[in-house]
Image: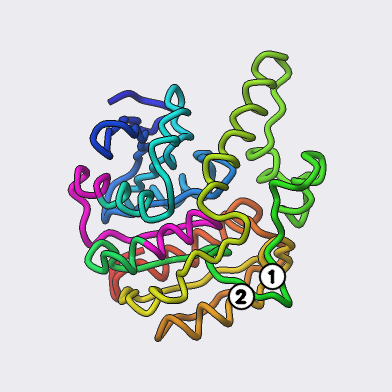
Amino acid sequence: MSSLNDTQARTLSVWQNRVRMRVLSKGAGPALVFFHGPWGLHWDPFLDTLSQHFTVHAPEHPGTTPGAPDDIYHLDGLWDLILCYDELLEQMGLEGAAFVGHSFGAMVACEVAAAYPRRASRLALIDPLGLWRDEAPVVNWMMLNPLELPGAIFRDPASAGARVMFAQPEDEEARVTAQVGLTWAMGATGKFIWPIPDKGLKKRIHRVKAPTLLIWGAEDRLVPPIYAEDFLRHIPGARIETVDKAGHAPHLEQPAAVAGLVRDFLRPSGAPA
């Protein structure tokens, strides 16, 4: 285990040791697993705030762990990915943890919770993928011009959150490395969702037993907020919180507000703040 920006990093092997997944962890308290979006894992103020109340574990999706990009070739489909996560959680000894996911990661969290209900005690889904409406299609961000991407994901493409995701180091080599990493992360996750991110979740979502909170950016330009209605219809008892002044990544544009929503939802009734 190594230390990275005050987080503890360890790499675990799953899928007959053919897929390596680095997990960043920080904090103390009940276990929380964060499933990141399709643009790679960034330890940001949102996760830092949550780590003040929970032990946050943030695994990197297969293929996005540094030094292990080709591991993604050992997975053929979404079910392989879900099984990998079950193996990872088993190795970590996590059962009944809180799941928090963003975008593609929220879809994965929902799929794991549906496949293995005992794994998730509570589920917070931030602008999740996984369902489809012909009249309101999800935007394929991989087809966008790279210069258009920040404006599609963020309400304010110049926000601090956007700068975290689309960092432009002054050093030329570091800048190229960051761009390659971003592109590879989109490809490694995109293979599980495109041409459309409807891989049958609607047939399995009724298996989700964990209390569920949906969080949606009011100005999400990638996954229209109307999709919240579908998740609410499929998950009994789920509720929605809409975040103003935020696009597809409200936890990065409004980290304090979204962390507060998640913290209040996950904190057991009567527990101290």
At label 2, which amino acid type do we have?
Tyr
| CB atoms of marks 2 and 1 within 8 Å | yes
Q: Is residue 169 above or below residue 167?
A: above
The residue that mark 2 highlights is 227
* Residue for point 76% across, 53% down: 152
Q: Position of residue 8 (x, y in %)?
A: 33, 32
Q: Is residue 147 above or below residue 141?
A: above
**Looking at the image, which is closer to me, 159 or 190?**
190
Residues drawn in magenta:
87-111
Can residue 5 be seen? no
* Residue for point 27% across, 59% down: 97
Residue 53: image quadrant is: bottom left
- For label 1, the crowd category at 10 Å Cα-Cα, with few meaning under 14, some 14 to 19 and many 20 or more, is many
Q: Is residue 163 above or below residue 214?
A: above
As drawn, the label of residue 248 is none
User: Mark 2: which secondary structure?
Assistant: helix
At label 1, which amino acid type do we have?
Pro
* Residue 55 falls inside the magenta stretch: no
Q: Position of residue 247 (x, y in %)?
A: 70, 60
User: Mark 1: which secondary structure?
Assistant: loop
Can residue 65 be seen? yes
* Residue for point 72% across, 53% down: 154
Query: Could you tell whether 124 is left or right of 240 in the image?
Result: left
* Residue for point 72% across, 27% down: 168
Query: Could you tell whether 185 is left or right of 156 in the image?
Result: left
Q: Position of residue 170 (x, y in %)?
A: 73, 18
Query: Could you tell whether 98 is left or right of 132 in the image?
Result: left
**Looking at the image, which is closer to me, 27 or 12?**
12
Instruction: Give the CA distance from mark 2 to mark 1.
Output: 6 Å
Query: Could you tell whether 55 is left or right of 254 in the image?
Result: left
The residue that mark 1 highlights is 224
Q: Position of residue 30 (x, y in %)?
A: 26, 56
